[in-house]
Every structure is written in C-alpha cells, then in structure tokens.
Amino acid sequence: MRNLLIIIFASVSFVASAETFTLQQCIDTAIANNIALLKQQNNYATASIQYKQSLANISPNLSAGASNMWSFGRSTASDNITYSNTSAMTTSFNLNASLVLFDGLAMKFAIDQARASMLSSEASIQAAELQLQLNISSMYLQVLLNKQILLAAQEQADDTQRVLHKDSLLLQANRLAEGEIYAVIAQLGNEQLQIVQAHNDVQLSLLNLAQAMNIDPQDFDIQDIPLDQLQEGAALPSRDDVLVLALSQRPEIRAQQYAIEAQEALLKQQKAAYSPTLSANAGMGTSYFAALSNGATNDAFGKQLGDNLQGTVGLTLSIPIYNKMQTPYAVKRQQINLDNARLSLEQQKQDIRKEVEQAYYNALNALTEAQAAEQALTNATVALDYLQKKFEAGRASSYEYTTAKTTFAKAQLTLLRSQYNYLFRLRILHYYAGTQW
C-alpha cells in the first residue's frame, strides 16, 4: 500500500508539472474541436450561400453565344431551280438578356426566407456553443471537486499517521494496550484506500474532460481555482428573473422564431405563384457568310457583321390559369408547416419554463444542503478539537479520537460535495438566463 501511495503522489506531482488549461481555454478548445459544432457551422455557411444566391436572383440574366457551321454538297442555286455543288461557312454571334419585372414578389419573399433560415442556423450554433460551455464547466467543476476530496483524504491519512506514530511510542513504553493500536492501523488502511479511490476519480474526471475537448489526455491537467473564488457572486438569482431572461434571450427561442419567419416567407412565396409574371427580354446578333467554292467572292468579315447586325426587345407575360391544383395544395401544405413551427415554439417555451423551474429548485435545495452541511462541519470541528485536546492530554483513547476524525472527514466531504453541487446548479441557472458568472 505504501508503494502504491508513493506512485500516486509521484503521478500527481508529474501531472502538476504538465501544461494546465484554464476554464476558458478548455471551453475554447472544446468549441474548436467539437465535430457536431463544426457541422453546424458548415450548415450556417450553406445557409449564408443560399441567402447570397437569393439576392443575386433579382439581377438580370445575361448570356452570349457563338456558332460556326460548314455546309458541303449539292444545294439549290439562287434561282431555286438548278442544283450545284457548293461549300459554305456561316458564323454567328448573339447576346441575350432577360429580367423579371414582376413575379408577385416571389423573389423578395425568397430573400426573406433565406435570410431567416440563415439567422436561425446562426442562433442554433450559439445554442450549441452554450450547451457545450455548460458541459465543459460542469466537468471542470467535477475535476476541482475530486482534487479537493483527494487533498482532504491525504490530510486525514497524514493526521492518522501521526496518531499511529504516537501510539507506537506509547505501546513501546507499555502505556497503551496492544489492541488499541490495531484500530488506528485499520483506520489508516481505510484512509489510504480512500486516497487511491480519490486519485482514480481525479484521473477519470480529467479523462472525461479531455475527451469532451477532443484532445490527448496524456499529461493533461487544469488550473486549480480556489473554492472561495468560485463562490464570489454565487448568490441565488430570482426564479422569475431567470425565466424572463430565458424566454427572451435563449438562442433556442430565437432560432425557432427565425424558423417561423422563414416559414411565413415561404408561405408568401407559395401564394405568389397565383400572380402573373412579367419579364423583359432583349437580344442582339449578327452573322458572317462565306462561300468556299472556287471563284466565289465574299464581303469582308467586319462589313458583314455590321450589315447583318440585328436586335430584339420585348416583354413576356405569363398568366397562371390551371396547373393541376399544384399551387393551392402547396399553399395548404405550407400553412400546416407554419402552424407546426408555431407549435414548436410554444412547446420549446413550455420546456424551458419547466427546465428553469426545476433548475431553480435544484439550486435552492443544493443551497440549503450546503448550509446544513456547513453547520454539521462546524459541530464536527468542535467535537474533534475537544477530543484532540483530551487525546493529547492522555484522557481520550485513540479509538475515540479516530472516531471523531472519521465524523469530521465525512462532514468535510459532505460539505465539499454540497458546495460544488450548488455551484453546478447555479451555473445551470446562469446558462438558462444567458448571463455570466
């Protein structure tokens, strides 16, 4: 057991010498390495491209074309009666443009829908980041708690080791019954086992945190934060204040609100299909013809292009009359989609309200438990101090003193757990409120 403890203490010292991460560094690393979050960022990039495309759709279409053709063999002559063997080449150029002047505002609604979808995707990323921050913070607090438990276990074992040394001297001087020292030895063995278990808990919690950050857990450690520093500003906020902030600022709510806006714009876009579409069209073109037969004369290339230049300008009106009821049914389906989006928002608000109420009462219970545990530790400390004085004066046995020490250790452990549990519950409340603590 002694050799095992030496290995544990050596490993703790080695970890202490490794590079440590602050809480913010852990959060930043987790955000940078989280695959699910990276995929959401790609979804946002896609939505952003779609929005830019919807803006570009209102610009005119412009296209250019060119062709070159050769003809060979017999064809009618200019008198359309006789035939002759001829070879010719025809080259043509054209430029065309079109612009939608009116489409029932369908393109405008498409822009609104793409913008709302992009903002909804952005809010979803923010929600995922906040959830990841909460998870990393919780794991960070768990590591801090396990380290405090390990430290307390080491202090208890050190104190028991001193008691055992004193009893050994008394036993050698025939001033202590041999049976009493066995109780201290058993107590020390139990505390050494607790050290091993606490050390394993520290390593496991560090592993969980490193895996959540998607980094190599080898030589990984975190920066210690004193408990009193964590407790600064750790007052329990009002439930109603948290609820108001959660319903007004949570990115999940904003994401769903933007989703509703997207569905509303899509409904208007579907209704725009009832409207006629008016488009303007313009084009120009020219051509060059060259007879390839022997002795044929052809006008110059530039002259022909200038002489053959022609242009067109026109308007096109398309009036929908009947399309197999596709538009009416599309509108009805979209109305249902919009209604479902609104119901999803109400469901999300109800879920957040329930979660906030549960989180508040969990934090309140954790606070009262911490206060009760603090009083229990105070009582255990008074009892231990009293028995320690009696033990040092030789008026209390080692068994009585170790029993008081065990009670003190349990009270100390209970207080540590309750304090960190309250901090965790409080962080959840601030997570819902969207506030920093």
Image (tube, grey):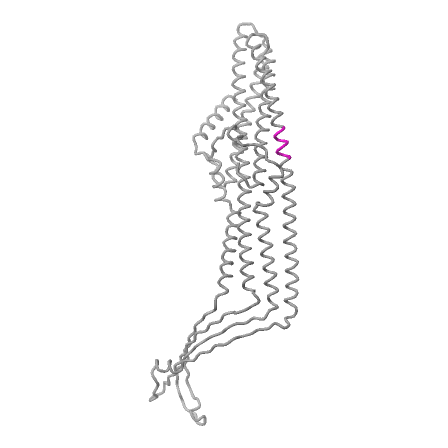
Is residue 366 part of the magenta span, yes or no?
Answer: yes
Query: Is residue 303 or residue 316 the one in the foreground?
Result: 316
Q: Residue at x 63, y 73 (%)?
A: 321
> Compared with residue 130, is residue 153 higher up or lower down, i.e. above or below?
above
- Residue 243 x %, y %: 62, 41
Residue 356 belongs to the span the image colors magenta:
no
Quadrant in the rendering for residue 92 = bottom left
Task: Find residue 62 and report its horizontal and vertical position in percent.
Answer: 45, 70
Up/down of 167 relative to 47, above or below: above
Image position, residue 201 (x, y; %)? 55, 30
- Front-most of 243 and 67? 243
Q: Is residue 25 shown above or below 87?
A: above
- Residue shown at the point (56%, 40%) measured from the top left: 431
The mark total stands at: 0
- Which one is in front, 357 or 66? 357
The stretch in magenta equals: 361-368
Q: Is residue 45 above or below residue 62?
A: above
| Residue 219 placement: quadrant | top left
Residue at the image position 52 percent from the left and 16 percent from the top: 161
Name the residue furthest top. Answer: 174
The main secondary structure of the magenta stretch is helix
Near-viewer residue (334 or 437): 437
Question: How far across and how far down the image is residue 310, in percent?
Answer: 43, 80
